[in-house]
Image (spheres, rainbow, N blue to C red):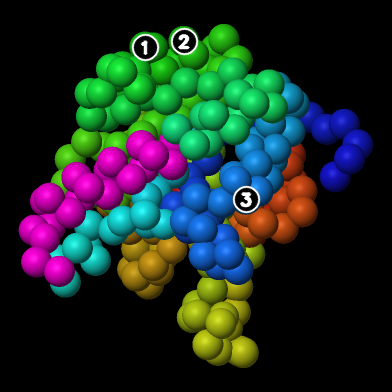
Amino acid sequence: MTEPFTPKYKRILLKLSGETLHNKATGHNLDADVILSVARQIKTVHAAGVQVALVVGGGNIFRGLAGEKHGISRSQGDYMGMLATVINSLALQSTLEQIGVETRVLSAITMPRIAEPFILRRATRHLQKGRVVIFAAGTGNPFFTTDSAAALRASEIQADCLLKGTKVDGIYDKDPKEHDDAVRYESITYQEAISRQLKVMDTAAFSLCHENHIPIVVFDFFKTDELLRVVAGEPVGTSIHE
């Protein structure tokens, strides 16, 4: 999409996994070229007048659940994972600002030397001033995923939509990498997503969005111009709604 367009959404929350910043070919957990590509996509949407908030996971660096296998308690592991999201958030902030996008990182865990504390009014004000806001450190509590954090922050800032960028072009009834007959859902309700135990997001995230009337769009972030198409309101990926 190169022609001008009118965004369907005024304010979005984009959720990306930590693996988004990972380059399998080089093995780099934080790959500069990949981060630059992500930042450029965000800049294009931001330049169209959309207020953009971000939540990025930390799975490319550390996962709390994985730590249990090595004797790390779930709580401690989750806190380590939250710190990983801060690293990713700072990397994205640095790259976005290098390409001319003013950005703020707000952390759920207080660390004033490197990020602002999460304060809802401050976050909203940054968005209104045209800054990209990155929410780091999840919810600040163990046992909650960054999907839940994304749903929580989307609810708090009253986002028009939560966009879940993945490496798959939507939600399928089964893993399309393992099953050739997998069928993609174009549209599905929150209740159906929960009852079918679809793993694209956790139940808490679906429930939060349901309660606060925030639609979700799951799409292939790595497909050219797909983020722009979603923001324009085109039927891309899988939409989850009431």
User: Tags 1 and 3 in contact by the CB under 8 Å rule?
Assistant: no
Q: Does residue 185 appear in the picture of this structure?
A: no
Task: Please tell me the numbered disc located at residue 121.
Answer: 1
Q: CA distance from mark 1 to mark 3?
A: 32 Å
- How far is disc 2 from disc 3 in space, using C-alphas? 29 Å
- The amino acid marked with disc number 2 is Arg
Identify residue for label 2.
125
The chief SS type of the magenta part is helix
Q: Position of residue 24 (x, y in %)?
A: 55, 67
In the depicted structure, whether residue 172 falls above or below residue 215: below
Looking at the rendered structure, the secondary structure element under dot 1 is helix
The alpha-carbon separation of the residues under discs 1 and 2 comes to: 6 Å
Magenta span of residues:
70-89
User: Is residue 191 found left or right of 229 in the rendered image?
Assistant: left
Name which residue lies at 35% across and 22% down. 114
User: What x and y, as percent, mark residue 132?
Assistant: 55, 24
Q: Amino acid at mark 1?
A: Arg
Report the residue at 22% width, 57% height from top: 64
Residue drawn where x is 60% and y is 24% of the image: 97
Circle 1: is it few (<14), some (14-19), or many (20+) Cα within 10 Å? few
Task: Look at 58% across and 64% down and name the residue there.
Answer: 26
Residue 219 picture quarter = bottom right
Q: Nearer the viewer, residue 65 or 152?
A: 65
Q: Report the amino acid beneath label 3.
A: Val
Do residues under tags 1 and 2 come within 8 Å of each other at their CB atoms?
Answer: yes
Which residue is denoted by mark 3 in the rendering?
34
